[in-house]
Amino acid sequence: MKAFEKNIRKVEPYVPGEQPQNKVIKLNTNENPYPPAPGVAKVLRELDTDRFRLYPDPTCAPLTEALADFYHVNPDQVFVGVGSDDVLSMCFLTFFNSEKPVLFPDITYSFYKVWAELYRIPYECQKLDEGFRVVKEDYFKENGGVIFPNPNAPTAIYEELHVVEDIIRANQDVIVIVDEAYVDFAGRSALELIDKYDNLIVVQTFSKARSMAGMRIGYAISNPTLIKYLNDAKYSFNSYTMNQAALACGVEAVKDKAYFEEGIRKIIQTREWAKEELSQLGFCCLDSSANFIFAMHPEYDAKEMFEALKKNGIYVRYWGSERIEQYMRITIGTREEMVALFAFLREYMKR
């Protein structure tokens, strides 16, 4: 090892889902199969490119105001960033600075471990129960902060709001972050609790229900004090995180509530039908409340099935990790994409 290598920060990076460039049925990264709201395309066509020579608004005011209006909060309660990953990373950097461990589930979004190790934050993983549900009592102990997704990923299981509130109530001396990337496909949001608990931060994204994964927009909603702390950290890191096009497109996406709700309805409808189809093929599926299904088949090896699907141009997600080595995560695509998936599976299983 060379002398300078001793001072290089080394981390095991997050591994994203594959992004194949050829035409495939892509059900591996939980993207929305439908286009964004029509206003997004319109604003892109009409965007004055002369604005690109200017720095974007560092306060992201048009977007924070649109989100504040949509969620009936004040603009100073909203923080936006380059996807919810950027927002969550900034939350780790800003709020998790205790010598006590941050708590999150053992089977969850794997970026949490990466950020904790990157920022040298101690952490402990709390085991999900045998049904892959959060055991709330495991979070009723001394810690340096709590974060968990609801619905969880990759399991797609949603915890009812009273369970979420029990965890927040037991941890009022630390920051609790509820990562709600998939909540639009599930149930009640922890946003209902923002005014009740001054230690709560709720993080959401445009990548799933709003069909804008490629535009990279995420946001946090909390009380003005915590949002100010986030902005202070952001301005110390990079004042201009959101580009001109993302801000303009984000505003248009938020405006079209009817399109947003219809897209969610279609995905949920396809998800429920897909659960039935998988069950008929003998799969065991967790009770999904997201835009994906976590499933395994007791008679077929998940890795072999994953490879066979990929070879035939159908991409799903497989980890092979402890406790979930026989599970695959299948994003909900269009009806036509899901029909093609089931046709392949029937042929693969010779049914």
Image (cartoon, rainbow, N blue to C red):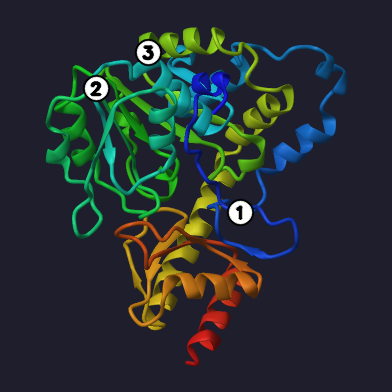
Instruction: Judge depth for marks 3 and 2 and give the one in front.
Output: 2
- Which quadrant would residue 282 be assigned to in this image? bottom left
Location of residue 315 with respect to 167 vertically, above or below: below
- From where the camera sits, is residue 73 visible? no
* Disc with the residue nearer the chain's start (1 vs 3): 1
Q: Which residue is located at x 39 percent, y 11 percent? A: 224
Q: Position of residue 19 (x, y in %)?
A: 65, 52
Location of residue 334 with respect to 42 vertically, above or below: below
- Which quadrant would residue 183 be assigned to in this image? top left
Q: Position of residue 177 (x, y in %)?
A: 33, 29
**What residue sits right under mark 3 in the picture?**
226
**What residue sits right under mark 2 in the picture?**
144
Q: Position of residue 96 (x, y in %)?
A: 33, 20
Name the residue at the bottom extreme.
Answer: 351
Contact between labelled residues 2 and 3, with CB atoms less than 8 Å apart: no
Q: Could you tell me how far apart the alpha carbons at marks 3 and 2 are, in whole angstroms?
A: 16 Å
Q: Could you tell me how far apart the alpha carbons at marks 1 and 3 are, in whole angstroms?
A: 35 Å
**What residue sits right under mark 1 in the picture?**
18
